[in-house]
Amino acid sequence: MAKYRKLGRTSDQRKALLRNQVTALLYNGKIVTTEARAKEVRKIVEPLITLAVKEKDNFETVKVTAKVARKDKDGKRVKQIVDKNTKAVLSETHRDKDGKILKIENGMTVTVYDEVEKEIKKDLPSRLHARRQMLKVLYPVKEVPNTPAGRKKNTKEINLADKLFDEYGPKYANRKGGYTRIIKIGPRKGDAAMEVVLELV
């Protein structure tokens, strides 16, 4: 006998459905789905959170120097014009006072970078393995702002593995399993399938 529900789908469709719902649950905190699906999603989510709790402190902080683009008061990158051959600075800015782009013979526009020292978390081997196990299940998530203005510019990638380690790991550190709850909300209108809210405790 099978150890899982087939959910009326082929294996690749079922895996995609479950991965989608696991990602949505960890990103939003709760989802509305059918009871059968919720029970299958719970089987996947609980071990992921257990893994996050186990490996939450398994990292070391390392200081690194990184190149970061210098920005002006408007938040735009500072650019200057340098000589193509000698790399000498010909102009501190690539625009004139009217805002038009300068054209200087034998010059090219380059972004100005500053070296900054940063502290980063470096995963130890077991935490790195746990991260890769999580990324096998989770889909990448992009957060898009609601306002249409600047929607493309302000879109950002959410790292759910980091969210598991940094947010859910400490939150459930003193809890021995049972990180989700299923609340029945009644039969669905179309096919009378039992609908439930699956949420993180």
Image (cartoon, rainbow, N blue to C red):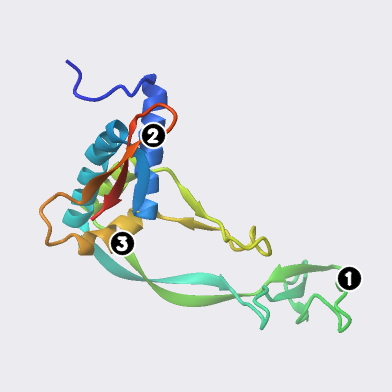
Closer mark to the observer between disc 3 and disc 1: 3
Residue 177, position as x, y percentages in the image:
13, 50
Residue 63, position as x, y percentages in the image:
35, 72
Image quadrant containing the N terminus: top left
Residue 186, position as x, y percentages in the image:
32, 39
Residue 86, position as x, y percentages in the image:
75, 71
Dot 3 crowding, Cα within 10 Å, few <14, some 14–19, many 20+: some
Dot 2 crowding, Cα within 10 Å, few <14, some 14–19, many 20+: few
Residue 122's disc is 3
- Whole-angstrom CA distance, mark 2 to mark 3, is 47 Å
Residue at 39% across, 34% down: 188
Residue at 42% across, 43% down: 139
Q: Amino acid at mark 3?
A: Lys
Dot 1 crowding, Cα within 10 Å, few <14, some 14–19, many 20+: few
Q: Name the residue that disc number 1 marks.
A: 103
Q: Quadrant of residue 94?
A: bottom right
Q: Name the residue that disc number 2 marks.
A: 188
- Whole-angstrom CA distance, mark 2 to mark 1, is 66 Å
Q: Amino acid at mark 1?
A: Lys
Residue 82's disc is none
| Residue placed most toward the observer, 166 or 145 | 145
Q: SS class of the residue under badge 2?
A: loop
Closer mark to the observer between disc 2 and disc 3: 2
Residue positioned most to the top: 1
Q: SS class of the residue under badge 3?
A: strand
Sequence-wise first label, 2 or 3: 3
Image quadrant containing the C terminus: bottom left
Q: SS class of the residue under badge 1?
A: loop
Q: Quadrant of residue 55?
A: bottom left
